[in-house]
Amino acid sequence: MHRYVVAFMTHPDLLEPGPMAASPIGPDAAALFDLPRAAADCRIVVAMSGGVDSSVVAALAAASGAEVIGITLQLYDYGAATGRKGACCAGDDIRDARAVADRLGIAHYVFDHESAFREEVVEQFADEYLAGRTPVPCIRCNMGPKFTDLFRMARELGADCLATGHYVRRMMTAEGAQLHRAFDPARDQSYFLYGTTDAQLDYLRFPLGGMPKPQVRELAEAAGLRNAAKPDSQDICFVPDGNYAAIVTKVRPEGAAPGNIVHAASGAVLGQHKGIVHFTVGQRKGLEIGGQPEPLYVIGLDGAAREVRVGPKRMLAVHAARVKETNRIGPLPEGPLTAKVRSMAQPVPVTLEGSLGDGGAVTIRFAAPEYGVAPGQAAVIYAGDRVIGGGWIDSTEKVTA
């Protein structure tokens, strides 16, 4: 890893007294943003959620010498979520973003996008659970209110680029910009950005993609940012205390309707549940159906019948998945491909059948049986560290042996 030095001295009157610590991040701040001309002639828009990551991006942008504008989208107001540590884009987080912008001496604007967020993310999140699928609202948010609206605003403001605090890397090649996994695998967020278009990637900048998280916190402390020690966001940002079922039933009360827990092989009714919103494919805990001869897992969910179907772990194995609404970033390379079918999963070898991209559908075939593949989740395709694209898992083909 290269070691460089950046000093946050764009607005010295706003820094804490005393010398600043050197930080290994880049030959100069401007280089992190791949600006098209001299920094003094450029404008950078920074998406500021109120967390430490986007705050450090704003500080780096300010240190570059470019004009910087911070934008925060107020996305939700769900009671306890607005004050929960580690949330984003609401309540205390907006105040933190404002305080960081004031300290850096940059312009900062807050836009109310709660209605769009509710319709495009929260309600769809609830509807997916009711249909028996397992949604990924962070991807929907990135593909919808966040990137779509932020891009429009940044371009209207005449910005040369839009910078975010995501942990991914944008790599320039002769064929254009590519999206790669982060330097720090523990912080990599590439799974959530597979829907990025080529045009968006040309405009986006991810200054933190080559840094480990401790280094980012050191930069925040060096810049005197009030949120340097702020906890990272956890779970789903708009869900207080991780209780997503409470949000689903608040938006769609029918999600609490009871139903049967059925053995997927025999069809026998093993018990009752208090709403399918409490279950996801691959889940073992919380079934409350003791006395079975072997451990049982959620094999599938039938939203229309309100059935939770369970079975032994071997029934979770699939050898293929049908993926719809696909996006491709750049050309499809030759050579081996891998796929992640959950955000925390490791990429596994796959082959593709069909044409990836342009909203079409493909079939992903796994080199070995894969477990816990849930409709509603995203399948993201990689070639080494490069993100090729992905789509939404629509259905799976079970291993029948």
Image (cartoon, helix red, strand yellow):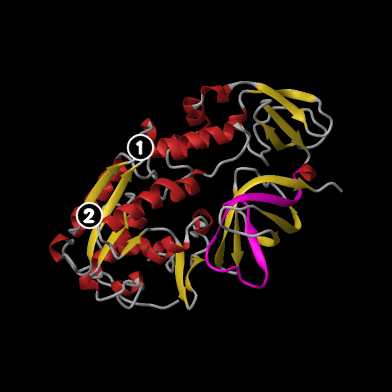
On the image, the x and y values in percent for residue 19 come to 20, 70
- Residue at position x 52%, y 22% from top? 253
Looking at the rendered structure, the kind of residue marked 2 is Ala
Per the model, the C-alpha gap separating discs 1 and 2 is 22 Å
**Between residues 16 and 71, which one lies in front from this camera angle?**
71
Q: Are marks 1 and 2 in contact (CB under 8 Å)?
A: no
Residue 330 position (above or below residue 240): below
Per the rendered image, the range of residues in magenta is 316-343
**Between residues 157 and 193, which one lies in front from this camera angle?**
157
Disc 2 target residue:
101
- Dividing the picture into quadrants, the one containing residue 363 is bottom right
- Residue at position x 42%, y 58% from top? 166
Residue 103 lies in the magenta-colored region: no
On the image, the x and y values in percent for residue 113 come to 34, 40
Q: Quadrant of the N terminus?
A: bottom left
- Dividing the picture into quadrants, the one containing residue 87 is top left
Considering the numbered disc 2 on the image, is that residue within a helix, a strand or a loop?
helix
- Residue at position x 20%, y 58% from top? 106
On the image, the x and y values in percent for residue 227 come to 30, 52
Q: Residues within 10 Å of mark 2 (few under 14, many from 20)?
A: many
Q: Residues within 10 Å of mark 1 (few under 14, many from 20)?
A: some
On the image, the x and y values in percent for residue 246 come to 49, 28
Considering the numbered disc 1 on the image, is that residue within a helix, a strand or a loop?
helix
**Between residues 237 and 124, which one lies in front from this camera angle?**
124
Disc 1 target residue:
114
**Between residues 384 and 391, which one lies in front from this camera angle?**
391
